[in-house]
Image: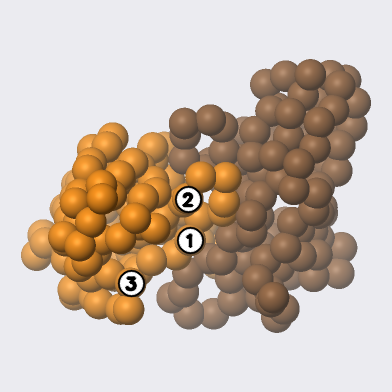
Amino acid sequence: DAKTTQPPSMDCAEGRAANLPCNHSTISGNEYVYWYRQIHSQGPQYIIHGLKNNETNEMASLIITEDRKSSTLILPHATLRDTAVYYCIVRVALSNTGNQFYFGTGTSLTVIP
Amino acid sequence: DTGVSQDPRHKITKRGQNVTFRCDPISEHNRLYWYRQTLGQGPEFLTYFQNEAQLEKSRLLSDRFSAERPKGSFSTLEIQRTEQGDSAMYLCASSPALGDTEAFFGQGTRLTVV
């Protein structure tokens, strides 16, 4: 069962920041928020993850609200190669030390030249 | 390349045939996952291994599906008596045993049942 809600599609102009929202209102205190993206016909690619604090890496920034019920992935300078489906995922700990990722249907981001 | 490797990349089979897919995880990754992805949907969890032990199975994994990881390294996913509804991308992922870390996905095996 998907635990996140994302808009089905978004457009972004090349060179501008892409801000992808995600709602995860039922998230538990020990569940992480992960972002992956998937370019057509390829496997999902890890972008970033966080628990409470905002996070930044070479690909993106993750802003998590104080109540942790929503987050935003920011691609600071979108390029055409960033066109992909972006998945916001809540990581659920499995019963035997594993971690299951619940993928929703994601946001299809189109970067426009 | 030391990423997750899946073989074959594409498989076309006739309904009723058996198929087997292979996944080679990143070396020394103890955790291995199988996911299934149908057109327009996100990946859905199928099963999880910690070393050679299969510790979790989704209800999506019917009795026609079986997964193994005999030596805690590579894994196989077999589908018996394939049905057209089995047509999907089958994704494998791996991650280290410890720590808060991401799972690394392979490129997937696309199965088409005709």
Residue type marked 3: Met
Mark positioned earlier in the residue sequence (2 or 1): 2
Q: Residues within 10 Å of mark 2 (few under 14, many from 20)?
A: some
Q: Which chain is brown?
A: B
Lateral position of residue A57 relative to residue B54, left or right: left
Residue type marked 2: Ile
Quarter in which the C terminus of chain B is drawn: top right
Mark 2 touches mark 1? (CB < 8 Å): yes
Question: What residue sits 69% from the left and 75% below the top?
Answer: B1
Determine the image quadrant of residue A98. bottom right
Marker disc for residue A39 = 2
Question: What residue sits 28% from the left and 35% below the top?
Answer: A8
Q: Secondary structure at mark 2?
A: loop
On the image, the x and y values in percent for residue A113 come to 26, 50
Return the residue found at the far left: A66
Q: Secondary structure at mark 3?
A: loop
Q: Which residue is mark 3?
A: A59
Q: Does residue B55 sit above or below B90 in this rendering? A: below
